[in-house]
Image (spheres, rainbow, N blue to C red):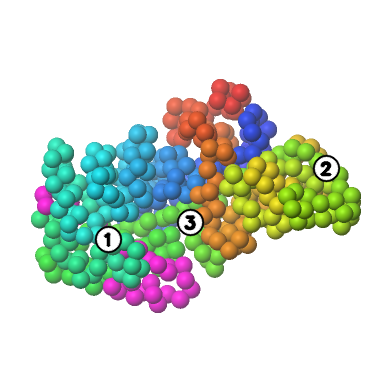
């Protein structure tokens, strides 16, 4: 496993901008294995890597998920699936959301399973498969709206949709699915109602003489809270990254956050009583103190809501944000022993040091960790991928690159040996 000392050593050798996101692929693999232990070997596990792997990087996360024991991948759009295919990923990929009529042929060409919610789409898709020259039926999943009223076929229409798919030799009904709206709610009644509606719809499909294979209902919260709803497969999203589906929940050990954010002190300023900090002068020093400059701001995904509210970790001590978070920089009040160049943990994992986690920041900001994680985009905030104590891949404005052949499947070279970091 990669340790905090390993990460600090990697960051000391890093020659780029000091502010980076570190994605711990060892911890991610441990999270996947923990979910495999929860669901057992007989249940298929879909690793949901939509939204660029919830901000962690869809390609390295998808590769690591499959190596750690996931069975298939889930994405939201055709483009997300194509990115994985062009990266050489051959695992089954399901596009979970609706797609446009102009996207069907591209999805077929890249062997992406699609989600169907009406008979007209099924007929049009079958025609496209027929003209594409594809020899095998395209796998599709029938999605049922059991009460969330977002995407899915109405229960009354489900038998007709199923019959349309079944009659089309170009299509194969690989799964029947729904999505829980409130699986993270302490009150299980709505989830139970949705499951009952789903079962009623499946019975209606069977009454039409069609077998119902590949049932899947459970998202991250559903997987953790409702073992009876695991059925044939589960879809693991936010919790796979070690983040909470809801602040009221806890994650079992050893599941922990996979991504942390780090920087270094770029400047130290001595303040006198009455000195103000940053735009608008929203914080005033009440006594002599020191503040430090950290090269991260809202353009990196570090939210402006953290102004005078969030904190960072400097020498295992809380360093509160002082004044407004700027586009590129943030000021923090320093502990007495801080020095220029000190390591700063901006976002932690909740187990090492005192830096807030994305879960904690989301709770303070009145949002969800999904939003914060997906905002940490690599065109500004370089993502470093670590495994077995070594840097194995980088993702930045120039794209994603592995530092060794099969870097995510075996130990990589040390940072000093990598031409990508000098």
In space, the residues marked 2 and 3 are separated at their CA atoms by 40 Å
> Secondary structure under badge 2?
strand
Q: Which residue is drawn at 26% across and 70% down?
A: 199
> Secondary structure under badge 1?
strand
Asked whether, in this view, residue 365 is left or right of residue 148, the answer is right
Q: Residue 239 carries which label?
A: 3
Look at mark 1 in the image and give the residue it sits on. 143
Q: Which one is closest to the eye, mark 2 or mark 1?
A: 2
Magenta range: 168-197
Asked whether, in this view, residue 352 is left or right of residue 96, the answer is right
Query: Residue 355: in sight, yes or no?
Result: yes
Residue 388 position in % (x across, y down): 55, 37
In space, the residues marked 3 and 1 are separated at their CA atoms by 22 Å
Q: Is residue 165 magenta?
A: no
Q: Which of marks 2 and 1 is nearer the N terminus?
A: 1
Residue 337 position in % (x across, y down): 84, 45
Q: Which one is closest to the eye, mark 3 or mark 1?
A: 1
Asked whether, in this view, residue 368 is left or right of residue 84, the answer is right
Q: Quadrant of the N terminus?
A: top right
Q: Which of marks 3 and 1 is nearer the N terminus?
A: 1
Q: Does the magenta stretch include residue 169?
A: yes
Asked whether, in this view, residue 256 is left or right of residue 238, the answer is right
> Secondary structure under badge 3?
helix
Q: Which residue is drawn at 46% across and 76% down?
A: 187
Residue 51 position in % (x across, y down): 43, 48
Q: Earlier in the sequence, mark 2 or mark 3?
A: 3
Q: Which residue is drawn at 12% across and 67% down?
A: 208
Total marks shown come to 3
User: Is 290 in front, or is 184?
Assistant: 290
Look at mark 2 in the image and give the residue it sits on. 269
């Amino acid at each position: 496993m990669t340790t905090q000392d390993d990460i600090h050593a990697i960051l000391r050798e890093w020659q780029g901008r000091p502010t980076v996101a570190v994605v711990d692929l060892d911890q991610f693999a441990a999270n996947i294995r923990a979910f495999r232990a929860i669901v057992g070997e007989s249940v298929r596990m879909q690793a949901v890597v939509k939204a660029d792997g919830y901000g962690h990087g869809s390609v390295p996360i998808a590769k690591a998920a499959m190596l750690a024991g996931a069975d298939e991948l889930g994405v939201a759009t055709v483009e997300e699936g194509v990115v994985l295919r062009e990266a050489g990923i051959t695992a089954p990929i399901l596009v979970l959301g609706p797609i446009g009529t102009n996207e069907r042929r591209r999805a077929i060409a890249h062997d992406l399973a699609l989600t169907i919610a009406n008979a007209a789409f099924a007929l049009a898709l079958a025609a496209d498969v027929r003209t594409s020259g594809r020899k095998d039926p395209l796998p599709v999943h029938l999605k049922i709206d059991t009460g969330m009223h977002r995407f899915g076929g109405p229960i009354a229409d489900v038998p007709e949709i199923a019959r349309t798919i079944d009659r089309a030799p170009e299509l194969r009904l690989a799964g029947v699915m729904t999505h829980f709206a409130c699986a993270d709610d302490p009150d299980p009644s709505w989830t139970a109602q949705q499951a009952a509606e789903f079962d009623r719809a499946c019975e209606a499909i069977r009454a039409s003489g069609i077998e119902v294979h590949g049932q899947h209902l459970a998202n991250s919260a559903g997987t953790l809270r409702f073992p009876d709803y695991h059925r044939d497969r589960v879809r693991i999203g936010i919790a796979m990254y070690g983040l909470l589906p809801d602040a009221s929940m806890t994650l079992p050990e050893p599941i922990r956050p996979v991504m942390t954010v780090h920087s270094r002190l770029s400047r130290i300023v001595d303040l006198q009583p009455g000195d103000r900090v940053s735009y608008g002068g929203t914080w005033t020093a009440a006594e002599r103190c020191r503040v430090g400059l950290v090269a991260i701001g809202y353009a990196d995904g570090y939210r402006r809501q953290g102004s005078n509210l969030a904190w960072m970790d400097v020498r295992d001590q809380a360093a509160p944000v002082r004044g407004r978070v700027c586009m590129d920089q943030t000021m923090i009040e320093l502990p007495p022993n801080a020095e220029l160049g000190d390591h700063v943990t901006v976002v932690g994992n909740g187990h090492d040091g005192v830096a807030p986690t994305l879960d904690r920041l989301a709770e303070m900001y009145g949002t969800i960790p999904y939003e914060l994680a997906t905002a940490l985009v690599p065109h500004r905030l370089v993502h470093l991928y670590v495994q077995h104590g070594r840097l194995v891949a980088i993702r930045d404005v120039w794209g994603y690159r592995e530092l060794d052949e099969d870097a995510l499947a075996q130990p990589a070279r040390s940072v000093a040996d990598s031409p990508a970091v000098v």
